[in-house]
Image (cartoon, rainbow, N blue to C red):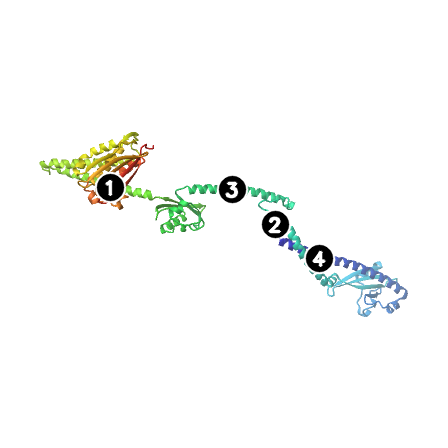
Amino acid sequence: MTKKIFVSIITICAVSVIAAIVLVTAFMYDKSVETAEKEVKTQAHIISSAVERLGEFFLESTDFGDDIRVTWIDRRGQVVFDTEEAPEALENHSDRKEISEAFEKGEGSSSRYSKTIMQKTINYAVRLNDYSVIRVSSVHISLEAQLLDVLKPMLLILAVVVVFSVLAATRVSRNIVRPINNIDLAHPDTKNSYKELAPLLEKLRSQNNKVSRQMDEIQSSREQFGLMTESMDEGLIITDPKLNVLTCNTSAKKLLGAGTFTEGQSIYALNNSEVFRICLMNALGGRRSECILRTGGGQREVIASPANSIDMVCGLVVFIMDVTEKQELETMRREFTSNVSHELKTPLTTIYGISDMLANGMVKQEDVAQFGGNIRSEAERLINLINDIVSLSKLDEDSAPRENESVELYSLAEEVLGRLKLSAEEKGVNTELTGEKVSLIGSRTILGEILYNLCDNAIKYNVSGGSLSVKISHIPQRAIITVSDTGMGIPQQHIGRIFERFYRVDKSRSRKIKGTGLGLSIVKHGVMYHNGTVRVDSEAGKGTVFTVELPIEKKQ
């Protein structure tokens, strides 16, 4: 703007000066032409009067100088006398404008311009009494010639004016623009600015207020969006078409195992595995894509959806979910199904085989009782397995009956050990119950199963002549059940998995011991049912100690 004002002032000054010079010169030229015409007319009348009195003698004896030319033309148009040329060398002048007017009206005038010499000739003719004509001519410099004469002074004046204009224009343009430059766009003030700018400043103030409100709303929305995405357990990433990250919550960085990451970087800075890249490329192709990533923290399900705008993909929305537990549960489900099938198949195969032999008369009469006992033993094993599966399913689905009764653990332990007395005697295991009477609110049936399975395992996996000790105690608001044995123990690398269904520490040895493989799973879920905890301390070859802690008042 300053430059435009500066150039405008310079241009106006230069044009004004040139126009003024031209106009003044033209005005002065018109005045000089008018004066010259008057002088030629006066001289023509004086000379014609003298010629009337003195005749040709006056013309020949008078020195008219170089400023005027005097010509005497007779009534036929022939030149009789001329101060510059010989009369006989001149053509007939009767057709000249000033001459013809003089013949008709007594006086005539004309002017002729020569482009070659850039001069204007002024003619004035007066008719004498004998009808001859005296013509006086004077040469006058033309306007163009006068302009050329004043060209150098004009250029000098123009240069001075330009210099002055540059200085003035610089100062003036700065003074004009300064109030505009000093406008506070954030808080426009109409008092300290040009009144012509008042409508614009008012509009600007109104727009600023509107923009400020909108920015506050956008910021509020961004903060709300940030709070919502940061509270998500799932990862969320939004990218542009070039896969530069526009937003990324903390869960996404955590799930993908990314370290330092800032928005604006490529999404591949979060994870650059081939599976991840293929998933994103498929989504950029315009279709929803899913994949499973295996990271150091587990397994992640990635869902990449294209954000479409008309016929083009303008970005991606990527969801990341931790499916480690889901995959582990699926693996456990498959293993459980496989194990259940195997555990059911074994006694059923035995029952079917023995039954087939009995049906076909392949068993001696004296062996029927033995084969019948085998069928009963396998059927009992099958029933126990089914009962354990049903119990475990109920605990899994939280569909076990909600019993809220007072259960005294010491007497319950006595009852359980009584049921296992025969098994302990057959194994040669000594049992012992110590402690005190402790009551809690819970399910007697489930608590009985916890004690039974712990004690049953302590007998099964004990050594001949070993011991089983059950202790009931309590601390403030917590009941403690301790079941210890002197059996074969559990290696440290297996302790973390013994509560898994059908998990066997030593499969070859465990198969020889009757059991369903679900006992400790039932213990774990039964303890969870009562909001308690169970821990194991064991050393291979030296025995195992199970410690169960239960709240005395079970939370609902």
Q: Marks 1 and 4, Cα distance to the nearest angstrom?
A: 116 Å
- In depth, the one of 290 and 445 nearer the eye is 445
- On the rendered structure, is 356 left or right of 74? left
Q: Nearer the viewer, mark 1 or mark 2?
A: 1
The image shows residue 17 at horizontal and vertical percentages of: 71, 57
**What residue is shown at x 75% (from left), y 57% (from top)?**
24
Q: Name the residue under label 3.
A: 216
| Of callouts 3 and 2, the N-terminal one | 2
| Of callouts 3 and 4, the N-terminal one | 4
- In depth, the one of 288 and 258 nearer the eye is 258
Answer yes or no: do the residues labelled 1 and 2 have beta carbons within 8 Å? no
**What residue is shown at x 54% (from left), y 42% (from top)?**
212
Q: Which amino acid does label 2 sit on?
A: Asn
Q: What residue type is labelled 4?
A: Val
Q: Mark 1 points at which residue?
A: 544
In terms of secondary structure, where does tag 1 sit? strand
- In depth, the one of 532 and 76 nearer the eye is 532
Q: Marks 1 and 2, Cα distance to the nearest angstrom?
A: 87 Å
Q: In which quarter of the image is residue 382?
A: top left
Q: Which amino acid does label 3 sit on?
A: Asp
Q: Mark 4 points at which residue?
A: 17
The image shows residue 302 at horizontal and vertical percentages of: 37, 46
| Of callouts 4 and 2, the N-terminal one | 4
The image shows residue 384 at horizontal and vertical percentages of: 22, 36
| Of callouts 3 and 1, the N-terminal one | 3
Please indicate, yes or no, whether residue 421 appears anywhere in the rendered image: yes
Density class for disc 1 (Cα within 10 Å; few <14, some 14-19, many ≥20) is many
**What residue is shown at x 29% (from left), y 29% (from top)?**
405
Density class for disc 2 (Cα within 10 Å; few <14, some 14-19, many ≥20) is few
| Of callouts 1 and 4, the N-terminal one | 4
Numbered label attached to residue 181: 2
